[in-house]
Amino acid sequence: MILEPQRESFDGLEGHITYLNCAYMSPQLRASVAAAKRALSRRSKPWQIAAEDFFREPEESRRLFARLVGGDPDGVALVPAASYGIAVAAGNLRTGPGGRILVLEEEFPSNYYAWAELAERTGAKLETVRHPADHDWTSAVLERLDGRVDVIAAPNCHWTDGSLLDLERVGEEARRAGAALVVDATQSLGARPLDVRRVRPDFLVASAYKWLLGPYGMAFLWVAEERREGRPIEHNWINRAGSEDFSGLAGYAAAFQPGARRYDAGERSNFILLPMANAALRRLLEWGVKNISETLGLLTDLAEEGAGELGLLPVPRGRRARHMIGLRLPGGEAAGVAGRLAEQGIFVSARGACLRVSPHLYNTREDVLRLLDALSRELRRRGYPALIRSTLDQGRNS
């Protein structure tokens, strides 16, 4: 189902701002802002915060996130960042001399450093899967997969240009080869449907502040059932069994809270961020991730058509996610062009050689057409044969 524009649901988008940059950071939902204001007011009166409040909102977070990914609440840990979740995964997977760890070329640093450290510490080999010319990441990864691969660390789509990886297929082949699959879903979860029952990752992490429309400083970690008895990377009071009883905390329980709760970060009961994140998760579930993906796909398709008329090289439709698209510019011009667009109130990101265009439900066709017109003028100014496209004229008249 195609959703109606939802600009009024977001805070801070007044005026003529054209924000096509959700992959960088989403604007806050008005519902999240309202939740934050209520939470701040409540936090100002600590005598009103009871012991059970340290657990009530976190459990609601687990329930909502589990619904989003098709899992159970016991599989959800609350962590402060994607890098934290990836560190948990790296600390609980086995490899060693002769073992191989696969990452994608130009992967986001948070999904690289932990694996580089693990390889150095254990004697395993960290291998980079090169960006395929045809953008077929799935085949590129599977061609490197054999019985010596211990870990595949991969996103659902590449953060620079939205090019896709078929996680269900990779997950199936990884299990057949005996490799663990660790997914950084930060650039897709909330805008592209994902079901952990089908992908079956060992670990999956997603930051809240992009496509989950939540606050900065929070992330969710999904843990497969067979990985829920592992070793947390920190020890805190609240992930131990019986921590609900504040009078018994000095009993120093050896056991952990059930499921993935053992991996929760300390101070996970953030009285400001959790209500904001939960408000955003409720809205995503209300809209429906499949509906969001279909709606955003109309906008990225329009960007693809217009970019093609400009002589740019967008990732083709069949190889990319529906919610974002990378427009490859010649000569390393992406950063300069993005800066010029920002001066005109049009916001996209320069990532590698690409202009990354990532709309959300606050955007319309007119936003994309404005981007393409400004991009055409800027490319012409820089000496490229940027032509006014008949497709854009047709788009305005349709």
Image (spheres, rainbow, N blue to C red):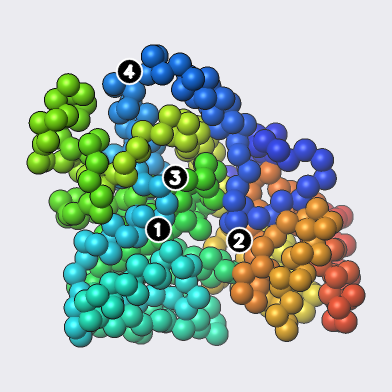
The disc, 4 or 3, on the residue closer to the chain's N-terminal end is 4
Query: How dense is the environment of label 2, judged by Cα within 10 Å: few (below 14), some, or many (20 and up)?
Result: many
- What's under tag 3, amino acid-wise? Met
The answer to whether residue 235 is visible is: yes
The disc, 2 or 3, on the residue closer to the chain's N-terminal end is 3
Label 4: which residue?
Answer: 50
Most extreme residue toward the top is: 48
Describe the element under mark 4 as helix, strand or loop. loop
Vertical order, 222 against 107 (above or below): above
Marks 4 and 3, how far apart at CA: 23 Å
Label 1: which residue?
Answer: 83
- What's under tag 1, amino acid-wise? Ser
Describe the element under mark 1 as helix, strand or loop. helix
Q: Looking at the image, is mark 4 or mark 3 nearer the viewer?
A: 4
The front one of 95 and 16 is 95
- What's under tag 4, amino acid-wise? Ala
Q: Looking at the image, is mark 2 or mark 3 nearer the viewer?
A: 3
The disc, 1 or 4, on the residue closer to the chain's N-terminal end is 4
Query: How dense is the environment of label 3, judged by Cα within 10 Å: few (below 14), some, or many (20 and up)?
Result: many
Residue at figure coordinates x 34%, y 60% from the top left: 86
CB within 8 Å, label 3 to label 1: no
Label 2: which residue?
Answer: 324
Query: How dense is the environment of label 4, judged by Cα within 10 Å: few (below 14), some, or many (20 and up)?
Result: few
The disc, 2 or 4, on the residue closer to the chain's N-terminal end is 4
Vertical order, 241 against 94 (above or below): above
- What's under tag 2, amino acid-wise? Met
Describe the element under mark 3 as helix, strand or loop. loop
CB within 8 Å, label 2 to label 4: no
Q: Mark number for residue 40?
A: none
Residue at figure coordinates x 50%, y 75% from the top left: 106
The disc, 2 or 1, on the residue closer to the chain's N-terminal end is 1
Instruction: Check the picture and name the quadrant holding the N terminus.
Output: top right
